[in-house]
């Protein structure tokens, strides 16, 4: 049974940091890609970053590169999203998702709609506010 479970969200002040975790299980894609997305109230879901679990290559949306870092612990099967210098506009529900890495990259680049990604977690809420 495939599963994605996010954790680590919460309330943080502007300029602060959070590290989100995505626990994965049951996936057999090769190569497996895990991505982080977010959806703010009233806005479309947007891709942020994804990682090729097999070779560790990472891919980012241009607008967040430098503030957010995706990484994985392949022993624990957990993918992280380290978020630094958070801003109020980062307030959203954050989701992790799984697919083969190539279509996930295409979603991140906006070439494929996110609804084509087959596996999603339930999300974790991040609120950036003073």
Image: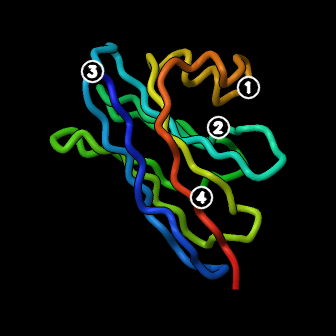
Picture disc at residue 110 = 1
Residue placed under numbered mark 3 in the picture: 1
* Pair 1/4: label in front: 1
Q: Name the residue located 71 percent from the left edge and 70 percent from the top edge.
A: 87
Q: Distance between the residues labelled 1 and 4?
A: 20 Å
Q: Name the residue located 76 percent from the left edge and 63 percent from the top edge.
A: 89
Q: Name the residue located 25 percent from the left edge and 45 percent from the top edge.
A: 73
Q: Distance between the residues labelled 1 and 3?
A: 29 Å
Q: Is mark 2 on a helix, strand or loop?
A: strand
Q: Name the residue located 64 percent from the left edge and 68 percent from the top edge.
A: 127
Taking the image as shown, residue 62 lies to the left or right of residue 34, namely right
Q: Mark 4 vs mark 3: which is more N-terminal? A: 3
Picture disc at residue 87 = none
Q: Mark 2 vs mark 1: which is more N-terminal? A: 2
Q: Distance between the residues labelled 2 and 3?
A: 25 Å
Q: Residue 67 placed where, x, y %?
A: 59, 61
Residue placed under numbered mark 2 in the picture: 47
Q: Mark 4 vs mark 2: which is more N-terminal? A: 2
Residue 97 drawn above or below residue 83: above
Q: How far apart are marks 4 and 2 (CA)?
A: 15 Å
- Mark 2 vs 1: CB contact within 8 A: yes
Q: Residue 80 placed where, x, y %?
A: 39, 51
Q: Residue 90 placed where, x, y %?
A: 69, 61
Q: Mark 1 vs mark 3: which is more N-terminal? A: 3
Picture disc at residue 66 = 4
């Amino acid at each position: 049974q495939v599963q994605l479970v996010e954790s680590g969200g919460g309330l943080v002040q502007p300029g602060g940091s959070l590290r989100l975790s995505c626990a994965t299980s049951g996936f057999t894609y090769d190569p497996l890609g895990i991505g982080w997305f977010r959806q703010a109230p009233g806005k479309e879901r947007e891709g942020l970053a994804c990682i090729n679990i097999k070779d560790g290559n990472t891919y980012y949306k241009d607008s967040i590169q430098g503030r957010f870092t995706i990484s994985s612990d392949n022993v624990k099967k957990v993918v992280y999203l380290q978020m630094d210098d958070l801003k109020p506009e980062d307030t959203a529900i954050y989701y992790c998702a799984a697919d083969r890495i190539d279509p996930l990259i295409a979603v991140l680049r906006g070439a494929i709609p996110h609804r084509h990604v087959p596996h999603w977690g339930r999300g974790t809420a991040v609120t950036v506010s003073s």
